[in-house]
Image: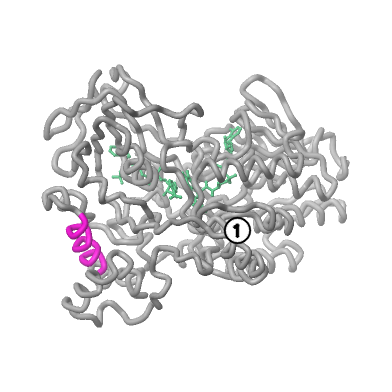
């Protein structure tokens, strides 16, 4: 072991073998550290291993939703579409595991249940469901922001007699939907991706929609070799721009969202109703992306929502169905943007029924369907597209104990507290990748993952070189960071009173309503992390 200052078996124990855990392993191993990765699943890929539902794909151009750390890797992997589907992204994860020989340090089928800081020894003991213990100087949680599927508690759910699936826990062998009558609950990103594809083969599909979403057409298409080569030769510039940007996305020539020729311009508040109507007619949903005031001004936002609803009514043939699909009463841009392929067109199909739960909610699940206040809907297969216990879910499901048996779950009872989304006071040598308080889910996650992992690997090397044994932040430093995270989120649509997003924990009953990610942008955030490191890890105490 390189930093052999303790009785630990490994320099670092990492939990999770998605993109975060894989890259953390690669990076620490490259620096000469000994590492063990523990993963519940039986292979790598995280999100892309679990979310195998029909239609699953990324909504960031794949040439950008990919790692930049290896020049060879980014040259040799040839993405086939602008936004790749789940099988291709999982293939990419497997390629990384093979290419860098990662699996030899990953133990699969291993669920971590406890991580405890042994104060006297200065090591972390990470314990698994099957009773194994692993010790490390450092413990890195690469457990994912969207890795704990949420299945809502609905009366009678256990009585359903047919097959039950969750988009976030989809069977590897897939599901043959022909001859099935399917009910699906949820119209977030997962539901909106799955519904059009399932509707293609199913006998009948009934969609239970509690809140209609704002979703934009993806305009996905195959990538030509010519485009790929051009993008590859522009990678240095693309990567630099990604790192300095707000969301970690450049959208370089990708035609992302179909609005590539639209320069954001005037304020929507300065337009007339006729102008807006004409624009929607000409450009469809993309017209709404023109205006910069929509994200910060509620009045402007409502005008954009009206444009949106007007386009919904254009796409949908039956105006009663169109009315059901129209989002109302909350701002556009308060939830994670959703993009789709043929979502609205699906509701023009004869084998699809939309149940607008605003007109009468679910009362109970029966053996053969769902009883709502507006009637009974019969089907033989039930799909939950009901999202995740996001950002804190995976961490709070592990019994994490810091100094003096101090429990993370208790410390976070009123909402997550971190410094930079990287560390938590009372938990020395313990780190979270893309934790709450970092840009994480508001960004192209691969950009954020690379930044966190690079920063942590440099920190661990620094500590080893200078013979520091522990690093720890304080509650006062956390307070300052949390105040800043809150300050930048104020006044945006993300924190509007009428917004009930999973960013705020609002999708899980009883979860504290706190805006969890950092909205300041990946560029600003990176600058801050670099300044902290340059100042000798300001805000952290390093001890020998
Ligand atoms: P994950 O991929 O979630 O991996 C975490 C791993 O930790 C999992 O394999 C899990 O099994 C394991 N784990 C958790 N708890 C334990 C435990 N107790 N013991 C052992 N193992 C454990 N982001 C984007 O930027 N662009 C996109 O287009 C995009 N699309 C998405 C689509 C879907 C359907 C979902 C769900 C998310 C999407 N995301 C997207 C976010 C996505 O989660 C990240 O991009 C990225 O894949 C996260 O990687 P990760 O390694 O941090 O976490
Ligand atoms: P989600 O956005 O949280 O959506 C969950 C859906 O289930 C919502 O429509 C919600 O309705 C509904 N729901 C939950 N409980 C319900 C109940 N008891 N009764 C009726 N409806 C209920 O989850 P998701 O769609 O899985 O997406 C989560 C995140 O994963 C996304 O925001 C995104 O970050 C990521 N993702 C990305 C992509 C992509 O395009 N790349 C695809 C999938 C997922 P309410 O809105 O009323 O709560």
On the rendered structure, is 376 left or right of 50? left
Indicate the position of residue 132 as horizontal and vertical percent values: 70, 22
Residue at screen point 61% across, 22% down: 129
Residue at screen point 59% across, 71% down: 241
Residue 452 seen anywhere in this rendered image of the structure: yes
- 465 or 285: nearer the viewer: 285
Indicate the position of residue 388 as horizontal and vertical percent values: 43, 40
In the image, residue 159 above or below residue 519: above
Indicate the position of residue 221 as horizontal and vertical percent values: 45, 56
On the rendered structure, is 314 left or right of 24? left
What's the coloring here? one colour
**Within the magenta stretch, is there residue 307?**
yes
Query: On the image, which quarter does residue 208 sit in?
Result: top left
Residue at screen point 51% across, 43% down: 86
On the rendered structure, is 480 left or right of 334? right
Residue at screen point 72% across, 40% down: 98
Indicate the position of residue 342 as horizontal and vertical percent values: 32, 51
Secondary structure of residue under mark 1:
helix
Q: Report the magenta stretch's main SS.
A: helix
Identify the residue position indicated by label 1 in the image.
Answer: 447
- 295 or 396: nearer the viewer: 295
In the image, residue 62 above or below residue 414: below
Rendered-image quarter of ligand 2: top left
Q: Quadrant of the N terminus?
A: top right
Instruction: Give the extent of the magenta segment.
Output: 304-315
In the image, residue 424 above or below residue 223: above
């Amino acid at each position: 072991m390189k930093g052999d200052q303790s009785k630990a078996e490994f320099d670092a124990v990492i939990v999770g073998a998605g993109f975060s855990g894989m890259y953390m392993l690669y990076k620490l191993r490259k620096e000469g550290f000994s590492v063990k990765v523990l993963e519940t699943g039986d292979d790598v890929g995280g999100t892309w291993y679990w979310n195998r539902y029909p239609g699953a794909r990324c909504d960031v151009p794949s040439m950008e939703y990919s790692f930049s750390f290896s020049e060879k890797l980014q040259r040799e992997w040839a993405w086939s579409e602008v936004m790749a589907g789940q099988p291709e992204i999982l293939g990419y994860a497997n390629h990384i595991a093979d290419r860098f020989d990662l699996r030899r340090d990953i133990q699969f089928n291993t669920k971590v249940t406890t991580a405890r800081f042994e104060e006297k020894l200065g090591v972390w003991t990470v314990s698994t469901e099957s009773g194994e213990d692993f010790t490390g100087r450092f413990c890195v949680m690469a457990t994912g922001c969207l890795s704990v599927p949420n299945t809502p508690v609905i009366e009678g759910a256990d009585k359903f007699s047919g097959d039950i699936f969750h988009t976030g826990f989809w069977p590897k062998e897939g599901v043959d939907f022909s001859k099935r009558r399917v009910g699906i609950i949820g119209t977030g990103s997962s539901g909106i991706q799955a519904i059009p594809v399932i509707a293609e083969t199913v006998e009948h599909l009934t969609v239970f929609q509690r809140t209609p979403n704002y979703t934009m057409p993806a305009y996905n298409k195959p990538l030509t070799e010519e485009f790929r080569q051009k993008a590859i030769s522009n990678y240095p510039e693309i990567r630099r721009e990604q790192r300095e940007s707000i969301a970690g996305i450049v959208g370089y020539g990708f035609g992302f969202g179909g609005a590539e020729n639209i320069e954001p311009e005037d304020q929507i508040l300065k337009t007339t109703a006729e102008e807006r109507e004409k624009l929607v007619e000409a450009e469809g949903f993309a017209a709404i992306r023109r205006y910069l005031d929509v994200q910060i001004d509620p009045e402007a936002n409502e005008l954009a929502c009206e444009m949106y609803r007007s386009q919904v009514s254009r796409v949908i043939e039956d105006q009663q169905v169109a009315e059901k699909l129209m989002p109302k009463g909350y701002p556009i841009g308060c939830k994670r943007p959703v993009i789709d392929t043929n979502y609205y067109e699906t509701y023009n199909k004869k084998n699809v029924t939309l149940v607008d739960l605003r007109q009468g909610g679910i009362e109970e699940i029966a053996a053969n369907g769902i009883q709502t206040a507006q009637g009974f809907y019969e089907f033989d297969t039930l799909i939950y597209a009901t999202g995740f216990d996001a950002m804190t879910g995976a961490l709070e499901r592990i019994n994490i104990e810091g100094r003096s048996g101090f429990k993370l779950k208790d410390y976070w009872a009123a909402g997550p507290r971190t410094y930079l989304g990287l560390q938590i006071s009372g938990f020395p040598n313990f780190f979270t990748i893309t934790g709450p308080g970092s840009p994480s889910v508001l960004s192209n996650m691969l950009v954020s993952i690379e930044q966190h992992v690079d920063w942590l690997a440099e920190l661990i090397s620094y500590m080893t070189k200078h013979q520091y044994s522990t690093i720890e932040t304080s509650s006062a430093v956390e307070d300052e960071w949390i105040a800043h995270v809150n300050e930048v989120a104020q006044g945006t649509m993300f924190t509007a009173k009428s917004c009930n997003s999973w960013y705020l924990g609002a999708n899980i009953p009883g979860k504290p309503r706190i805006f969890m990610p950092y909205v300041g942008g990946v560029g600003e955030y990176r600058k801050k992390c670099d300044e902290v490191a340059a100042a000798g890890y300001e805000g952290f105490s390093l001890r020998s």
